[in-house]
Amino acid sequence: MRSRAESLVLFSVFFSLIIIIAQECDYILFVEGQKVPAVFVFGDSFGDTGNNDFIITTSKSNFPPYGRDFIDRIPTGRFSNGKLLSDYFAEGLGIKELLPPSLDPNLNAQDLLTGVSFASAGSGLDNLTDLINEAIPFWKQIECFKEYKKKIAGFVGEEEATNIIRKAIFFITIGSNDWGFSYFLLVIPTRRLEFTVQEYTDFLLNQYTVYIKELYNLGVTRIALINVPPLGCAPGERTVTSLRNRGACDQEINEAVSGFNSGLNAMIDGLKPAFPSLQIASLDYNSLVSEFIANPRRYGFEVVARGCCGTGLVEYSFLCNELNPFTCPDASKYLFFDAVHLTQKAYQFISNVFLTTDIPQLL
């Protein structure tokens, strides 16, 4: 029986090898036979490629320095200096270079047929989270997907639309804002007054199960659930806890997230027997980010406790702006671009690992 320390060492070595292999390969890993006709993303800012540009919300990033390493240096509403996991998934599966937001009014038929992102920065499984962050709720994202199905059926017919949905991969990244805002936010600790950590975990996972079943009933059969990262190690959270922990990660939040992620795996195991045609996988985003934080130089990172933008301690969304004179000159040296979200380099690494190890089981 291996100790936890031994297991972590083995994971670190394995992850390093996967990174090396992925870097040596092209992004397009599964083009042959066109097994995946489209990619769709639901969830929060880790998957939002610009939907919040088209709604009234304070959770926006369509201004510099966001997007400064993106194509033509254009800020598109992606919470990073460049591409997101959403884009790298679409590219890595041989579909297209970028995954557009579903609310973009300029989308053409080909854009829609090959997939879009329905994600909204600030969204959560808890409707209170959506109210706090002025985000598009998960249930509303599903409603948008229903409208999307009608649109593509108009292009290719009902049968082909059903076939596209059945063969497409649906990525979901959700839960971070529920813990970061609705439960642990110091200013408005609303859910913490109502639920224990375990009770809130159960509440969120019950909601998650309802949404997965609804997507399945809409014809979705390939789903990849991206778990919640170690939120207690995000620069913003380190800053909040710095007075008592000297800038260390907030272990209370990380333990809550860890419990949620374990529950997510149990939820997946429970869904499989009930829905035999559902192919569903968990993508361990948490472990990869934790590995970067533990061994930054192994992956070319120099700074993991601060973001690139501004002081790197608290700035994200409108606090991360081009008027801030402290933004770093080279984001590739940083794990985080702002106080919450990762850099393009980190997303590229993570997507390569998922495309190499986890996503093939859905094909």
Image (cartoon, rainbow, N blue to C red):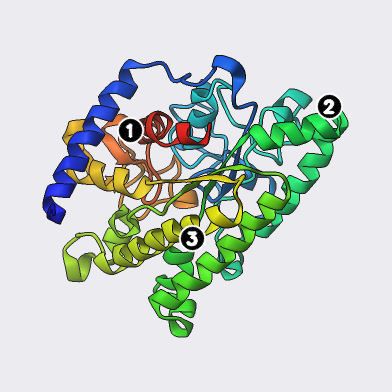
- Report whether residue 141 is seen: no
- What residue does disc 1 label? 331
Q: Residues within 10 Å of mark 1 (few under 14, many from 20)?
A: many
Q: Which residue in the protein does label 3 denote?
A: 267
Residue sitting at x 63%, y 42% = 221
Give the x, y percent position of residue 313: 30, 53
- Say which quarter of the image contains residue 3: bottom left
Which image quarter: residue 65?
A: top left
Distance from label 2 to label 1 (Cα)? 42 Å
23 to the left or right of 109: left
How far across and down, in percent of the image, does residue 279 sit? 55, 43
Q: Is residue 154 left or right of residue 264?
A: right
Q: Earlier in the sequence, mark 3 or mark 1?
A: 3
323 relative position to 311: left or right: right
Decide: few, some or many residues near mark 2? Use Cα within 10 Å; few <14, some 14-19, many ≥20: some
How much space separates mark 2 and mark 3, taking CA atoms?
A: 35 Å
Q: Residues within 10 Å of mark 3 (few under 14, many from 20)?
A: some
Amino acid type at image mark 3? Met
Check disc 2 and give the amino acid type: Val
Picture disc at residue 127? none
| Residue placed under numbered mark 2 in the picture | 156
